[in-house]
Image (tube, rainbow, N blue to C red):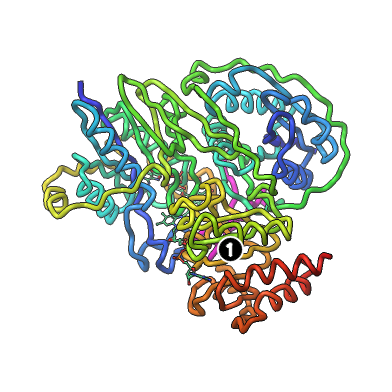
Amino acid sequence: MAEVLVYVDHVDGAVRKPTLELLTLARRIGEPVAVSLGAGAEATAAALAEHGAVKVLTADAPEFADYLVVPKVDALQAAYESVSAAGSPAAVLVPSSAEGKEIAARLAVRIGSGIITDAIDLEAGDEGLVATQSVFAAAFTTKSRVSKGTPVITVKPNSAPVEAAPAAGAVEALSVSFSEKATGTKVVARTPRESTGRPELTEAAIVVSGGRGVGSAESFSVIESLADSLGAAVGASRAAVDAGWYPHSSQVGQTGKSVSPQLYIASGISGAIQHRAGMQTSKTIVAVNKDAEAPIFDMVDYGVVGDLFEVVPQLTEEIKSRKG
Amino acid sequence: MSLRIVVCVKYVPDATGDRHFADDLTVDRDDVDGLLSELDEYAVEQALQIAEEADDAEITVLTVGPEDAKDALRKALSMGADKAVHVEDDDLHGTDVMGTSLVLAKAVEKTGYDLVICGMASTDGTMGVLPAVLAERLGVPQVTQLSEVFVGDGVVKGRRDGDTATEQLEASLPAVVSVTDQSGEARYPSFKGIMAAKKKPVESLDLEDLEIEAEEVGLEGAWTAVESAAERPARSAGTIVKDEGEGGKQLAAFLAERKFI
Ligand SMILES: Cc1cc2nc3c(=O)[nH]c(=O)nc-3n(C[C@H](O)[C@H](O)[C@H](O)COP(=O)(O)OP(=O)(O)OC[C@H]3O[C@@H](n4cnc5c(N)ncnc54)[C@H](O)[C@@H]3O)c2cc1C
Ligand SMILES: Cc1cc2nc3c(=O)[nH]c(=O)nc-3n(C[C@H](O)[C@H](O)[C@H](O)COP(=O)(O)OP(=O)(O)OC[C@H]3O[C@@H](n4cnc5c(N)ncnc54)[C@H](O)[C@@H]3O)c2cc1C
C-alpha cells in the first residue's frame, strides 16, 4: 500500500486533535507516515502510533521555532523525498490552520503538485483522490482533484472522527538540510496564547457564541456560563470582537475561526454571510435573538425569539438542574 | 531611493450576492456584481500608511483578472494608490492558485518591487495561501497574516496572531507581506480621490508580455480540477418559538431530545 504523509500539528509534543482526524482519513488511502517537527517531536510518537501511524519521521532544530514557515517546508520536503525513494506517496495531508496551509502550499509549488485547501472529506476516485470542499460560505459543496503531481491537501478540523487504530509508529530521525531561504523571516518573540480552560474553539463538540446583542464585555459572562454548563467553547461575532468585548482568537467566521461542531448556539448574532461562512456546517444550530426577522433563524434547527438575558440564563439553570 | 510597493488585489463576486458556478465549474461572474475583495482593502490601507511614513514611495496595485477587474483597480487608485497593472488574457480563464501565483510573480518582477502586500485571503477562493506561494516563487521572505505592520530602514516587522501563539516577525526587504482585517480600518475614497483616480495610469499586460505560455495557466494548465459543484440542500426549516417566559426551558428540552444534555 502506498504511503500517505501526514504533517503533525503539536504543541511541545501534545498532538492536536485535527492531526488525529487526518490519520483516520490517511488510513482510508494508504499507510500513514507522520512527520513531526520541533521541540517535543519524539514525544508525539505514542499518540500517533495509537491512531495508525506506521512510521513517525522526526526532526528537531532551533530553526523550526526561530524562523517562520520555511524551515518546516524544508523538512516536509525532505520527508517527501525520503518516502518517494520507495515509490510516490499517495498524498500529503496537512491540517488546515493558517500555518498548515502555508506550509502545504509552498511544498506543493516545490514538488510540482497541485493543492486543495480546506477539504472536509476525502475519498478514492477513479482518477485519484477526490476532496470535498464547502465553498461560498457553505452554500455549495464541490468535489475536486489534484491533477498534477502528488495530491497536497489541507483538511479542516472536525472533518473525520478520531479512531484508535494501533500501528507500529516506528520513530525515524529525518535529516534536514535547511535551504538558504529558511532563515528569511525571524520570529523575534513568541507569546503562547493563554489557555481559557475551555475546549479549543475549532475542536469543540459544542460552541456557544455571542454577538453584538450581548452588549458589553461584562455581559459575556452570560454566554460563558452557558458554555461551561455544556462543556463548550466560547465564540464571538466580529461585531463583538471589534467592540473589544471578546478576544479575536474567539471570532467565528470568514476572518476568524471556522467551526463545525455537533452543536452551535448563537445568541445576539444576526447571521451575516461572513459569520455563516464560519459555522454553517455545524450539525445542529440553535439561536436566541429578539428579532424574529434575523437571518440566523433561516438556518436553525431550533430558535427562540426573545431577550437573550432572559432565555440564556434560564437555559443554563435548566441544563444544570437536568445534569444534577 | 524610492520604496516600491506592489499591492495584489483580487476582483471577486459580491459575497452578499447569489454566488454560483458556471457550466465549466468556474466562478460565474456574469450574474453577480463584482468588487475589490474587501480583505484587500486592508492591504491597500497598509500600503498607504507605509508610503506616508516613507520619504518617497510609489504604490502600484496589481490584479490578475477579467476585463471588469479594472473596477477593483479603480477603487484602489481612488483610495490613493499611484498606478495600476492589469494582467488580462483569455487564456487565464479558470487558473488555479499555482497559475495565479506564477502570473503574479512575473508581473511583480516586471513592475519592480521592494515590498509586496496582499490581503489575508480572497473572499471567494478563501485559500489564504497565495502570499506564501508568491514568496516561494520570488525567493524572498514571507511575512504573512500580520495584524500590525511596520516598515523602515529596509526592514519589515509585524505581529502574527497564530492559532497557539502570537509572534513578532522581522525580515529584510524585499519581502512579501499579507495583512489581516485586524490591521486597521481601510479608508473610504474621497471625492478628490475618485476624480484623481480617473487620470492615474493603468497598464495592461497579457501572457506574452510576461513570457508565460498559455499551457502553463488557465483551466487546461491547472494542477487541480473541479469535478462537481452542488448547491447545499437548504436546511430543513427548524422550530421557532417565541419566548413567553419558558423559552430557556423549551430550548433545554430540545437539547435534551437531541441528547446534548
Ligand atoms: C470582509 C468581511 C469579513 C467579515 N468577517 C466576519 C467574521 O469572521 N465573523 C463575523 O461574525 N462577522 C464578520 N464580518 C462582519 C459581518 O458582516 C457582520 O457585521 C457581523 O457578523 C455582525 O455581528 P452580529 O451578528 O453580532 O451583530 P448584528 O448584525 O448587529 O446583530 C446583532 C443581533 O443581536 C440581536 N439582539 C440585540 N439585543 C439582543 C438581546 N438582548 N437578546 C437577543 N438578541 C439581541 C439583534 O436583533 C441582532 O440580530 C465580516 C465582514 C466583512 C465585510
Ligand atoms: C470556491 C473556490 C475554491 C477554490 N479552491 C481552489 C483550490 O483548492 N486549489 C486551487 O489551486 N485553486 C482553487 N481555487 C482557485 C483560486 O481561488 C484562484 O486561483 C485564486 O486566484 C488564488 O486563490 P485565492 O483567491 O483563494 O487566494 P488567497 O490565497 O485567498 O488570496 C490571498 C491574497 O492573494 C492576492 N490575490 C489572490 N488572487 C489574486 C489575483 N487574481 N490577482 C491579484 N491578487 C490576488 C490578494 O491579495 C489576496 O488577498 C478556488 C476558487 C474558488 C472560487
Along the horizontal axis of the image, is B194 left or right of A222? Answer: left
- Does residue A154 appear anywhere in the picture? yes
Residue B20 or residue B35, whichever sits in front: B35
Pinpoint residue A127: horizontal percent, then vertical percent.
Answer: 65, 50
Residue B256 or residue B212, whichever sits in front: B256
Residue A198 or residue A122, whichever sits in front: A198
Along the horizontal axis of the image, is B76 left or right of B98? Answer: left
Residue A68 among those drawn in magenta: no
In terms of image quadrants, where is residue B217? top left
| Placement of the N terminus of chain A among the 4 image quadrants | top right
Residue A137 among those drawn in magenta: yes
Query: Which residue is identified by label 1?
Result: A280
- Does residue B215 appear anywhere in the picture? no
| Placement of the C terminus of chain A among the 4 image quadrants | bottom right
Chain identity of mark 1: A
Task: Report the residue at 57% width, 46% height from top.
Answer: A116
Judge: label 1 CB < 8 Å from ligand 1: no
Pinpoint residue A86: horizontal percent, then vertical percent.
Answer: 75, 26
Pinpoint residue B30: horizontal percent, then vertical percent.
Answer: 35, 65
Q: Amino acid at mark 1?
A: Gln
Pinpoint residue B59: horizontal percent, then vertical percent.
Answer: 24, 36
Question: Which secondary structure, mark 1?
Answer: loop
Along the horizontal axis of the image, is A237 left or right of B53? Answer: right
Main secondary structure along the magenta-highlighted residues:
strand
The stretch of residues the image draws in magenta is A125-148
Residue B243 or residue A292, whichever sits in front: B243
Q: Is residue B172 above or below residue A129?
A: above
Task: Report the residue at 63% width, 49% height from top.
Answer: A156
